[in-house]
Image (cartoon, coloured by chain):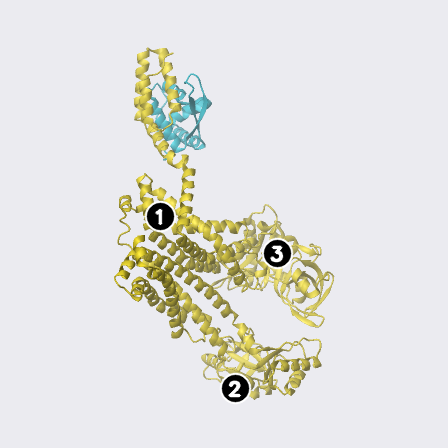
Chain colours: A cyan, B yellow
């Protein structure tokens, strides 16, 4: 299972990293649709989150009940160490490829 | 504020089943309220519906559903389920008391040998664990690689220790130990043999042995200082304090500087220690530069804390290079082992110091235990499956109620584990007396502690659970496969009254093993009898052996021969019929040499012991002169010498020390040593001076009085020495104690194997007869005789025992006659026919008796009541 990280999965992981202790379903959804300009359903997001959890890249816990959600609790997500390692590997690979690119990639 | 569409929520909940959607619903509510701000209500509602649809088909949703479905079985109700298993198990045990008893006792007996083996294994692994510095103490071992082979020794060169201390700062201390300190202590005229070590000064600092008296830093400092164990001190000085006393020995006078606690759970084995300085005084070689002799010198290094073993390895590699220079043809390697790992990991070394068990012996022991355990596991399997017919309905109903295969397996395995735990308790009580009995045969049993401790307890419980798993897995699988429809109809019951298929195989195997063990007992018993009654080629009846212990030998012999009951007196250095260690090398051509056994004898030895001379004159050996030693030899020696040099005079040869010998008589080969030893070349030389025992042939109506008379003669000559007289026969018998030990061991094993097999037999018979109660009643009403009924019930079982016997006879013959007895005793008579026949008859009788016990009940019963019963 481990070892391969899809583009969307990477996006979700980095978003969780950006949101820090506010990373729960709706927040992640809004953040991604704002930054990446993607339309995203809650089902697709939860599927990805479940897969990431299975792969051991994120862990989750339930927060306190809130009023605006009809007394329901939020599920918060956080990155595990293996996720950090995988992201770092990914970044290193990208940096390497960028640095080694033979044609000019910068758009002036 | 409006709420999200209820129908959508209901749909979602309905599909989710038991899955927990709290956080997802919360998220959706939040999105909904967000949408409400931006758009109209119907748009938000539509969006909500869309979200629900996407969720229903998403992976995350399915996953939650699946895990929620399983969580119900495995986490929420498991305690209640296990409780139920226990309850059912205990009710089942109580309901079938005979089966439970047979099973539990069978398993308990079967486990007992394994428990002993495990006890020994645990004990051995806990040896030398008490040293506070155990992780820093290493024994240095030497491995010598010659052209052909590599030999591994526990010992090392005497120069190693000084070299290590001087050159490597991480070595805190090195304890030198020289084995072979065997003083003869003269204590108020009485002589005692002791054994111990020469031990380096740091002994009590490095190892955590407790001194009762004395200063641990100084007890082994000076030459001729000595530390006694508490037991030795008690033996020599009784309740007096031993500290400061002097002890006279043949090696000099020693000062007792300390008394230590008795040895306990350690590989060291000694009665007394003296300082290594003493050895330096007594030894002629320069120990500091001795890179040659390594056989009896042991070194234990203590490293400073925080030292890596790689440092020691590097240091030893450098040290080995120095030693290598002294051995041009071989390559030397020095290794090390942590003190607590010496036993049992390095116990198969050539010259291991002290006592211990080697790994191989442990494995062998456990293998025997498993061999005994297997039949009882088979019993359990057999009986449980046979009993399945009674329990099939229970399982059937469980299955109909929706129980999964896995759960039925778990239930049955737990049941078996409960049974093995019960058996463990009983087995423990069977094991304790057997262990005591077995340890009596181990000469160092006093230093080991085999009492129950926490490690043992854990190993035992783990073992019992493992046995439960193995014994339970087959019945569990069988039960799990049962078809509920058929079992509820009662169809399994039909046509399965006979012992069938592989159950027969297991049964035959059990009886095969029992028979092999019984034959073993018979075979060893026969050899033992043979050994005691057979004369080894000389006369040992009515011969008294009296150790000289420094008395004037010539006077004693003259005085003894004057007694009217004494027919003849002679003397020898070793007692014939016992093991003798004195070996020398002789050569007939000064190039090749052979090892021969050397015995010194006095006048008339050959005649008195009735040894057969095939050539020459036995009396001539007393006429040796300075140029030439006249000797008697056996045929084997002549044969061995002939191999080298056929032309020359085979009656002359030279000993390793240069003495020239001439053979004046040849003895017919006989067993000078026990029958288990090969007859080796032997030379007899004449010397009363070097003889150790007087051999007195007596012929007396009252042997007690004669011995008292002899003792009086003895004390007239020398009052300070103690008189000891034993019959040569008794001494020889004692030399065969290994037979007695083996006989006992095999008896125990065969009793266990037979009992287990009979328990199994009993179970099967009682089961089949129970199931055939109706059939027998009908037969009886139709006029069957008791004999024919008995035949009907037993023929199957007797057939199986017969098959087992047919298999066991050739196996026992090959195993005992060709292999086992051959190692035990080379000059025995092998396995006799009578022993085999007796063993088989015995087994048949035991088998038939246990069958009869069960069948008699059924055949005697009134058929009318039995017919009503079923």
Between marks 1 and 2, how big is the CA–CA gap? 76 Å
Q: Seen from this angle, which residue lies furthest left?
A: B782
Identify the subunit bearing mark 2.
B
The mark nearer the N terminus, 1 or 2, is 1
Q: Which residue is disc 2 drawn over?
A: B665
Residue B530: x and y in percent read: 47, 76
Structural crowding at the residue carrying mark 3, measured as other residues with C-alpha within 10 Å and reported as few (<14), some (14–19) or many (≥20): some
Between marks 2 and 3 in the image, the one whose residue lies nearer the viewer:
2
Residue B122: x and y in percent read: 52, 54
Q: Seen from this angle, which residue lies furthest right?
A: B244
In front: B524, or B224?
B524
Between marks 1 and 2 in the image, the one whose residue lies nearer the viewer:
1
Identify the subunit bearing mark 1.
B
Q: Quadrant of residue B705?
A: bottom right
In front: B36, or A83?
B36
Residue B206: x and y in percent read: 63, 53
Structural crowding at the residue carrying mark 1, measured as other residues with C-alpha within 10 Å and reported as few (<14), some (14–19) or many (≥20): many
Identify the subunit bearing mark 3.
B
Q: Secondary structure at mark 1?
A: helix
Between marks 3 and 1 in the image, the one whose residue lies nearer the viewer:
1
| Residue B267 can be seen in this image | no
Between marks 3 and 1, how big is the CA–CA gap? 65 Å
Q: Quadrant of the N terminus of chain B?
A: top left
In front: B273, or B361?
B361
Look at the numbered discs 2 and 3 and tell me whether their residues touch, using CB distance below 8 Å. no
Look at the numbered discs 1 and 2 and tell me whether their residues touch, using CB distance below 8 Å. no
Q: Which residue is disc 1 drawn over?
A: B476
Q: Which residue is disc 3 drawn over?
A: B163
**A17 in relation to B300, above or below:** above
**B571 in relation to A2, above or below:** below
């Amino acid at each position: 299972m481990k070892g391969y990280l899809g583009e969307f999965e990477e996006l979700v992981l980095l978003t969780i990293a950006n949101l820090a202790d506010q990373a729960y379903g709706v927040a992640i959804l809004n953040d991604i649709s704002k930054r990446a300009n993607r339309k995203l359903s809650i089902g697709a997001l939860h599927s990805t989150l479940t897969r990431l959890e299975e792969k051991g890249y994120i862990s989750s816990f339930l927060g306190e009940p809130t009023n605006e959600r009809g007394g329901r609790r939020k599920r918060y997500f956080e990155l595990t160490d293996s996720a950090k390692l995988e992201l770092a590997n990914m970044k290193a690979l990208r940096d390497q490829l960028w640095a080694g690119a033979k044609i000019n990639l910068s758009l002036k | 504020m409006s709420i999200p569409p209820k129908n959508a929520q209901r749909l979602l909940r309905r599909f989710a089943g038991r899955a927990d959607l709290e956080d997802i619903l919360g998220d959706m509510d939040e999105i909904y309220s967000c949408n409400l701000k931006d758009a109209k209500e119907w748009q938000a509602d539509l969006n909500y519906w869309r979200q629900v649809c996407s969720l229903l088909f998403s992976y995350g949703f399915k996953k939650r559903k699946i895990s929620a479905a399983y969580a119900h079985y495995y986490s929420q109700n498991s305690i209640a389920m296990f409780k139920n298993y226990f309850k059912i198990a205990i009710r089942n045990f109580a309901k079938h008391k005979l089966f439970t008893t047979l099973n539990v006792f069978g398993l308990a007996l079967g486990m007992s040998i394994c428990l002993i083996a495990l006890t020994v294994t645990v004990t051995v692994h806990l040896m030398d664990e008490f040293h506070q510095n155990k992780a820093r103490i290493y024994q240095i071992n030497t491995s010598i690689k010659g052209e052909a082979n590599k030999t591994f020794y526990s010992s090392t060169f005497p120069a190693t220790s000084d070299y290590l201390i001087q050159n490597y700062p991480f070595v805190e201390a090195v304890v030198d130990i020289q084995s072979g300190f065997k003083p003869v202590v003269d204590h108020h005229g009485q002589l005692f043999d002791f054994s111990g070590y020469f031990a380096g000064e740091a002994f009590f600092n490095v190892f955590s042995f407790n001194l009762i008296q004395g200063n641990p830093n100084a007890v082994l400092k000076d030459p001729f200082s000595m530390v006694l164990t508490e037991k030795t001190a008690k033996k020599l000085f009784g309740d007096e304090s031993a500290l400061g006393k002097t002890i006279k020995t043949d090696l000099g006078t020693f000062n007792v500087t300390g008394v230590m606690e008795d040895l306990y759970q350690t590989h060291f084995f000694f009665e007394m220690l003296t300082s290594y300085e003493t050895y330096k005084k007594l030894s002629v070689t320069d120990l500091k530069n001795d890179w040659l002799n390594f056989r009896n010198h042991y070194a234990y290094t203590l490293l400073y804390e925080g030292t890596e073993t790689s440092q020691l390895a590097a240091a030893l590699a450098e040290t080995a290079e120095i030693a290598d220079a002294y051995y041009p043809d071989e390559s030397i390697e020095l290794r090390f082992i942590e003190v607590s790992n010496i036993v049992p990991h390095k116990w198969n070394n050539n010259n291991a110091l002290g006592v211990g068990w080697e790994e191989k012996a442990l494995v062998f022991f456990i293998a025997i235990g498993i061999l005994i355990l297997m039949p009882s596991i088979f019993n359990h399997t057999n009986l449980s499956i046979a009993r399945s017919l009674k329990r099939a309905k229970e399982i059937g109903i469980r299955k109909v109620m929706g129980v999964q295969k896995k759960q039925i397996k778990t239930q049955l395995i737990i049941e078996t584990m409960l049974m093995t735990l019960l058996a463990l308790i009983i087995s423990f009580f069977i094991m304790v007396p057997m262990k005591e009995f077995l340890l009596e045969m181990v000469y160092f049993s006093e230093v080991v502690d085999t009492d129950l401790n926490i490690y043992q307890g854990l190993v035992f419980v783990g073992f019992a659970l493992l046995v439960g798993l193995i014994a339970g897995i087959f019945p569990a699988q069988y039960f799990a496969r049962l078809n509920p429809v058929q079992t509820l109809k009662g169809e399994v019951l039909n046509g399965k009254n006979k012992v069938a298929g592989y159950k027969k195989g297991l049964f035959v195997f059990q009886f095969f093993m029992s028979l092999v063990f019984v034959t073993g007992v018979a075979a060893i018993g026969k050899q033992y009898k043979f050994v005691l009654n057979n004369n080894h080629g000389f006369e040992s009846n009515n011969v008294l052996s009296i150790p000289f212990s420094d008395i004037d030998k010539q006077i004693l012999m003259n005085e003894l021969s004057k007694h009217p009951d004494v027919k003849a007196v002679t003397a020898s250095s070793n007692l014939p019929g016992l093991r003798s260690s004195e070996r020398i090398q002789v050569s007939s051509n000064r190039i090749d040499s052979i090892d021969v056994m050397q015995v010194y004898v006095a006048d008339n030895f050959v005649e008195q012991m009735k040894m057969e001379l095939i050539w020459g004159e036995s009396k001539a050996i007393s006429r040796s002169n300075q140029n030439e030693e006249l000797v008697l030899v056996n045929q084997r020696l002549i044969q061995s010498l002939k191999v080298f040099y056929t032309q020359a005079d085979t009656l002359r040869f030279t000993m390793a020390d240069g003495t020239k010998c001439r053979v004046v008589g040849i003895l017919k080969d006989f067993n000078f040593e026990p029958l288990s030893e090969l007859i080796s070349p032997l030379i007899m030389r004449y010397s009363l001076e070097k003889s150790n025992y007087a051999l007195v042939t007596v012929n007396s109506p009252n042997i007690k009085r004669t011995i008292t008379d002899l003792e009086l003669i003895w004390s007239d000559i020398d009052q300070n020495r103690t008189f000891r007289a034993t019959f040569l026969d008794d001494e020889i018998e004692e030399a065969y104690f290994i037979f007695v030990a083996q006989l006992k061991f095999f008896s125990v094993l065969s009793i266990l194997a037979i009992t287990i097999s009979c328990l199994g037999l009993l179970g099967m018979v009682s089961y089949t007869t129970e199931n055939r109660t109706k059939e027998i009643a009908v037969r009886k009403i139709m006029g069957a005789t008791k004999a024919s009924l008995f035949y009907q019930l037993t023929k199957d079982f007797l057939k199986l025992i017969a098959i087992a016997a047919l298999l066991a006879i050739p196996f026992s013959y090959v195993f005992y006659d060709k292999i086992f007895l051959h190692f035990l005793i080379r000059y025995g008579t092998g396995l006799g026919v009578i022993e085999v026949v007796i063993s088989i008859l015995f087994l048949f009788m035991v088998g038939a008796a246990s069958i009869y016990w069960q069948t008699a009940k059924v055949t005697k019963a009134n058929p009318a009541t039995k017919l009503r019963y079923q």
